[in-house]
Amino acid sequence: MRVPVWLTLGVALLVCVFGLYRMRLAFRSDEEDERARARKGLYAMGRRTHFLIGVVYLLLGSALVATSFGWNPFGNLFGPKTEIPAKDAAPTKDAPPAKTGGSEPQPPPKQ
């Protein structure tokens, strides 16, 4: 089963928006920072940490966009090696003509 491209692009958009939000939290004022430290959880983190995590989220979102358009981060690390056969060594070099399946005349065989 293959994941639809629109779904991966939608998730990538959400990841990038959350990364931008975390970067916005990194540029809050001193007053907002003091109020946020009184809370617990996500807002109690330091500014530099918010910025670093925002950058990581932006990188993850851009990797999702790139994989949606065919980029493979592992390259040829997994799977068998494939070789493109030479034109003269192709298995269909001397193949008989394909059947047309209709009343069309067949071309004469080569001799």
Image (spheres, grey):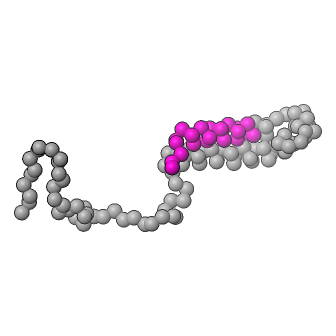
Screen quadrant of the C terminus: bottom left
**Residue 57 visible in image:** yes
Residue 108 lies in quadrant:
bottom left
The reply, left or right, for residue 86 in relation to residue 102 is: right
Residue beneath the point at 79% across and 37% down: 25
Q: Position of residue 57 (x, y in %)?
A: 68, 45
Using residue 17 as the reference point, say whether residue 92 is left or right of it. left
Q: Nearer the viewer, residue 8 or 108?
A: 108
Whether residue 34 appears in magenta in the rendering, the answer is no
Q: Which residue is farthest right?
A: 38
Q: Main secondary structure of the magenta part?
A: helix
Q: Is residue 16 magenta?
A: yes
Q: What residue do we see at 70% from left, 41% from top?
A: 19
Query: Is 44 in front, or is 90?
Result: 90
- Asked whether residue 30 appears in the rendered view, the answer is no
Q: Position of residue 43 (x, y in %)?
A: 84, 40
Where residue 45 appears, as percent x and y from the top left, is 84, 45
What are the residue bounds of the magenta stretch?
A: 1-23
- What residue is rendered at 18% in x and 61% in y? 95
In the rendered structure, the answer to whether residue 109 lies left or right of residue 41 reads: left
Nearest to the observer: residue 25 or residue 75: 75
Q: Quadrant of residue 86?
A: bottom left
